[in-house]
Amino acid sequence: MRTLIYCLMAGFILTFASCGTSKKATLETLEKSPADRRTVLLDELKNKASKAARKEEQQYKKEGYKNFIGDLPISKQIENAWVKTIDMNTLGYPEYIVGNAQVTAGNITAAKSQALHAAKVEIASLMTSMIASLIESSVANNEVSQGEAQTLNKHLQATKELVVADLGQVTKDLEVYRDLPNKNVQVITRLSYSSALALEASRRRMQKEMQAETQDLHNKLDKVFNLERLKPESNTNVPIAD
C-alpha cells in the first residue's frame, strides 16, 4: 500500500497522455485564455480523465479509504489534483509543485498533521531537485564553474529543511483516510504549491545562507534561477508519459 498513490496517479497520467493532446497545444490554449486556466485545463481532462478518476476512486474504496466529511468525492479530488499536475506556465514550466504523503498514526489528527508535513517535505525535496537541475544547466552553458556549482549546491542542501517553514498557501488537493485493524489511522495527502513562490522562497533562503560569499556568486545565483530551463515533469515524483 505504500506505493498505492503513485500507482494510481501514474495510471491517471497515462490515461491522460494517451488521449493525444500535446503539452504544446495545452500551452497555446492557456496563452490565449490566461484568466481562465482552470476551465481550460478541466476541458482538457473532461471525458478523458473522469472515467479513470472514478476507476481510481473505486480502487481507493476497495482498499478501505474514504474522504473526510465535507470533502469532495474522491474522484473529484483526483481530477482537481491532476489539474495542478498538468498545468503549465506560459513559459512552459510547471505552474505547481506537487507533493504526496502516506502516513500512519494513532489517531486522525496526528495522521493528518504528519501527512501534511511529509508532503511539504516532498515539495521542498522536489524544489531542491529543480534548482539543482538549474545549476547543472548553468554549468553546461558555462555561466557557472564546477567549483561555484558545488558551493551553490552546498548552500542549497543546507536550506532545504528551512524552506519547509516558508511554504505559505499550500493547497490540499487530495486527502483520504482509512481505519486499520490495529486501531491506527492511515492518511494519504496530496498538496500543490506555486512553483514560482517555492523557488523564490528557496532563493531567499539561499541568499541569506550565502551572506559570506562574494557578490559575484550572488549575481550568478540570480542567473541560475532561469525558470525557462525547467523540465515539464520536474514538479512531481510521479512518472509522466510523453
Image (cartoon, rainbow, N blue to C red):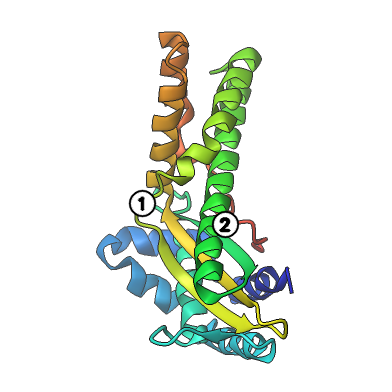
Q: Name the amino acid, label 2.
A: Ala
What number is the disc on residue 168?
1
Q: Decide which of 80, 46 is in the foreground and name it.
A: 80
Where on the picture, by quarter, is residue 197? top left
Q: Is residue 46 toward the left or the right of residue 184 in the image?
A: left
Label 1 Cα crowd, 10 Å radius (few <14 / some 14-19 / many 20+): few
Looking at the rendered structure, the secondary structure element under dot 2 is helix
One can see residue 215 in this view: yes
* Residue 202 horizontal/vertical position (percent): 45, 36
Q: Is residue 176 toward the left or the right of residue 61 in the image?
A: left
Q: Residue at x 67, y 68 (%)?
A: 6
Where on the picture, by quarter, is residue 155? top right
Q: Name the amino acid, label 1.
A: Gly
Q: Residue at x 46, y 11 (%)?
A: 212
What number is the disc on residue 118?
2
Looking at the rendered structure, the secondary structure element under dot 1 is loop
* Residue 132 horizontal/vertical position (percent): 59, 34
Q: Quadrant of the C terminus?
A: bottom right
What number is the disc on residue 59?
none
Q: CA distance from mark 1 to mark 2?
A: 15 Å
- Disc nearer the start of the sequence (1/2): 2
